[in-house]
Image (tube, helix red, strand yellow):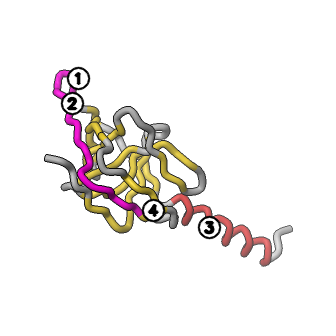
Amino acid sequence: MKTPAHVLAITVLLMCLSACAGQHTSSQLTALPSSSQAQIRTLAQVATIKLDTGFFRALPPGSVWEVIGVIPDGEVYRPVKDLFTVEGANIREAYLVVRSDLLVGFYFPDDRGVSLMQAPVPLRFRR
């Protein structure tokens, strides 16, 4: 039999877990046609990102990103010759979701999900 204390403990635990995960939703990636020329972009300056989980990540200047497709929230950028991860409840491979040179979230290729950030981060790419 569950006591009110048990119900409260389970509720608090579920709330904490959902807060750690952020707003993660499924998203269909529309890949760029294979006949199109790959769009490669290089960051001109460091971009410091405060994740909604409280962790920080830095995208270094000179890092190279390839646009691989689009989702409703923006273009999806995969790192070239590198691996990018973000940390929440666990550490996961992530791609950038960019709209109008603003980092708006992360695309997770392992489960085809997206997590949008509460505060987008401006990105400066070399022209």
In this rendering, the label closer to the viewer, 2 or 1: 2
Proximity of marks 2 and 3: CB atoms separated by less than 8 Å: no
Q: Which mark is residue 51?
A: 4
Residue for badge 1: 34
SS state under label 1 = loop
- Residue 9 vertical position relative to residue 58 in the rendered view, above or below: below
- Magenta segment: 33-49
Specify few, some or many for label 3: CA neighbours under 10 Å numbering under 14, 14-19, or 20 or more: few
Identify the residue under disc 2.
38
Tag 1: amino acid:
Ser
Q: CA distance from mark 4 to mark 3?
A: 16 Å
- Report the residue at 46% width, 54% height from top: 24
First along the sequence among labels 2 and 4: 2
CB atoms at circles 2 and 4 under 8 Å apart? no
Q: Earlier in the sequence, mark 3 or mark 1?
A: 3
Nearer to us of marks 4 and 3 is: 4
Closer to the camera in the image, 88 or 40: 40
Task: Specify which label sits upstream in the sequence, 4 or 3.
Answer: 3
Q: Residue 124 vs residue 7: left or right?
A: left
111, above or below 125, in the image? above
Residue 27 falls within the magenta-colored stretch: no
